[in-house]
Amino acid sequence: MSDEERVTQDEPEVDEVTALNQALAEEKEKAENYLANWQRSQADFVNYKRRSEQEKGELSKFANAQLMLGLLPVLDDLERALDSVKPQLTDSDWVEGIRLIERKLRAGLEAQGLIQIKAMDEAFDPNFHQAAGHSKGEEGTVVQELQKGYMLQDRVLRPSVVIVGSGETEEE
Amino acid sequence: MGKVIGIDLGTTFSAVAVMEGGEPTVIPNAEGGRTTPSVVAISKTGERLVGQVARRQAITNADNTVFSIKRLMGRKYDEPSVEYDRAHLPYKIVKASNNDARVIMGGKEYSPPEISAMILQKLKTDAEAYLGETVNEVVVTVPAYFNDSQRQSTKDAGKIAGLEVLRIINEPTAAALAYGLDKKSEETIAVYDLGGGTFDISILELGGGTFQVKSTNGDTHLGGDDFDQIIMDWVCDEYKREQGIDLRQDKMALQRLKEASEKAKTELSTVQQTEINLPFITADASGPKHLSMNLSRSKLEQLVMDLVERSLGPCRQAMTDADKTAAQIDEVVLVGGQTRMPLVQEKVKQFFGKEPHKGVNPDEVVAIGAAIQAGVLKGDVKDVLLLDVTPLTLGIETVGRVVTPLIPRNTTIPTSKSQIFSTAADNQPSVEILVLQGERPMAADNRTLGRFMLDGILPAPRGVPQIEVSFDIDANGILSVKAHDKGTGKEQKITITASSGLAKEEVEQMQREAEMHAAEDTKYREEVEIRNTADSMAYTADKMLRDNKDKIPEDLNKEVEEKVAAVRSVIQGADVEAIKRASQELSDSMQKVGQAVYQQQPPPDQEPPPEGGDDEGTVEGEFHEV
């Protein structure tokens, strides 16, 4: 912003030239401002477009995430059911049928990109596991898996809920 | 010079938002979450963890995981609240040489601003990744009751994170901004903030463009988590009664129950009843045990009523301190996830005697307000670039007395749109452009903004000339409509100023009328299309007979002529079904002609009929000849 120039007691022509120069300078500055803002706007638009495309791509990739997340508890429960089959029933046809169903559900989800997270005996990694407590066992290693964790393609859908070894060999 | 972001630096969760295209948007973090846990940790391997990752290992690394650092910001070691925290927080709090409270993490000493800076840094990095540009300036929110020392600490945290904090604003003020309450002149606003762990009530006064905090109050141990706990307790007690098993002894069962309780609570905000269904929750000597209980909304409300009532005490106190009665409160704003519960909304409404503002996501409203403030401070898009929208659809009249829209309503201006049109009759020498504004499909039901003619169109069969009609609205709302004959190069245009449009009430009236008449308008428009199609078909059939005279057997020729006559005779009538039937019969006959011709020696390819007849793209609408 140019300060107001003191007009000297010269011929009126000089005054006019000075005034015009000043006006010109102001207009130039305005024009630069407008150009800059326009460029910024354009850049914002381009960035927004790029991001929009990206999000669209991600959307199709992860559109199923919510649905799968909602179905995981069902998978968990089926596993629990099969884990607690009474010994005398374990070979029954009916139980076998449930096993087939569980396999089918799992296969269906895996076909959509579901991947189980390795937890048991692995080094505890908060990027994939959530610690629910300590227990005796090798320090920093997962000694128990309370709930299976899953990835959807390359993103963690639900972390494994685990118990981490505390490094003690005996319970305190 | 990058964007300025708004950050809600919360005790348990933080959120980031930015102004984009004039609207505030929440920026998701690298993991895809719209909020980030305010947790920092140093792992056993010396790695620094921030956010969700830090939270996941909190239990196994309690000594080196710092959360709720906000409680220690700007505080001295021997303040009573710090004493309380020292006794209750699992990480070590120590005294600095100047008496400030500090924490030990990974064997090193850190000031609370340094810890907060780590959180801000992650938020900054994730925002930059999302926006694709650097972020150096930020607006951060703090509780209204924060003193100077606490505010300065927050500013310091920003600096350490490499961010210039343009302003610190109060959380309740940010919430008011998010709802645009700053647009009014004088207002008293109550902000009811019920989050995960704490409750805050603030009374603000807006005057002369600024917000003043008149009073604050709250309960630092009242939040959504307490609601979840009540549900869990009830389920455990019921289960013990029914099954004789205490689920509280089983870590895994508790984990599942916690998730299920939270889920049930959330569902009951939208439905009246939900089932808590946990198969194989535990087992005893007789085998596996399941949990299946119904929880109704009314039962939930009974269970949590005390908690909700507890929040009203601080509200009363805050009103007294601000010297206001409920009648003097002009607006109420809800913040925090727990305010989604219908009971909470109902109680707040009863207490203040007015409907609270709740459209914005209550978990994000503070971040959004911060972004709005950031946008205002940035200033370079103020005034000069406040963009308008055109409130009503703009178009021209086309054959059948319908409107073909060119610029739909609520399009941001400046904008322009062109479309190619053509003539409706053979050798039509001119077209009349009738510019219309409104939502109804029939030209007569809309407002005429202007009209002009473009003549000198060369003689040609209908549908052949290419007349490009362009609409252009500049930033001041001035509409120019131009018609350009691509063949002759002739052009005409008119300019319509905004003032020849409609006032706000008229706009709303027109929109309402459009809605009311929507059904009959659609029907009418369909009729017109059927008529137009029939007309085109008749014309095309005639042309086809002329062009292929020698290739068509006499009887087929006669058949088509008859069908064309049949169409032409019903087309002016009111019986739409008759028109459809006649059109169909004509179409069938025309196909026979095609077959007949193609079965002979391969003739030069027949030209397909000139009009598109498609539904999208540059369809040639046709002009109604004057």
Image (cartoon, coloured by chain):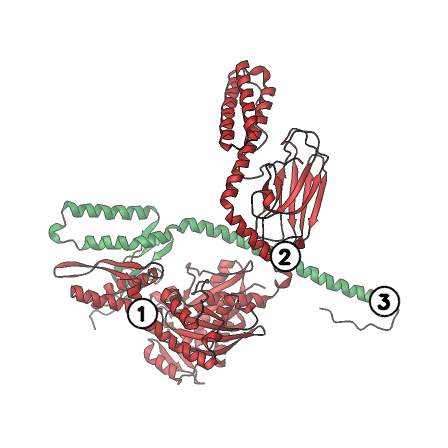
Residue identified by numbered label 1: B304
The number of callouts visible is: 3
The secondary structure type at the circle numbered 2 is helix
**Residue drawn 12% across the image and 59% down it:** B286
CB atoms of marks 2 and 1 within 8 Å: no
Q: Nearer the viewer, mark 3 or mark 1?
A: 1
- Tell me which residue sits at (50%, 53%) in the image: A51
Residue on which disc 3 sits = A14
Residue placed under numbered mark 2 in the picture: A38
Say which colour chain A has.
Answer: green
Do the numbered discs 3 and 2 sit on residues whose CB atoms are within 8 Å?
no
Type of amino acid under label 1: Val
Determine the chain carrying the residue at label 1.
Answer: B
Specify whether A56 is left or right of B474.
left
In the image, B586: left or right of B38? right
Q: Name the kind of residue labelled 2 in the image.
A: Trp
At which x and y percent is residue B26? 47, 61
How many C-alpha atoms fall within 10 Å of the one at disc 1: few (<14), some, or many (≥20)? Answer: some
Chain letter for the red part: B
The chain to which mark 2 is attached is A
Snapshot quadrant of residue B336:
bottom left
Q: Is residue B553 above or below residue A107?
A: above
As helix, strand or loop, the secondary structure at mark 1 comes to helix
Q: Position of residue B547 (x, y in %)?
A: 60, 20
**Closest to the observer, B411 or B84:** B411
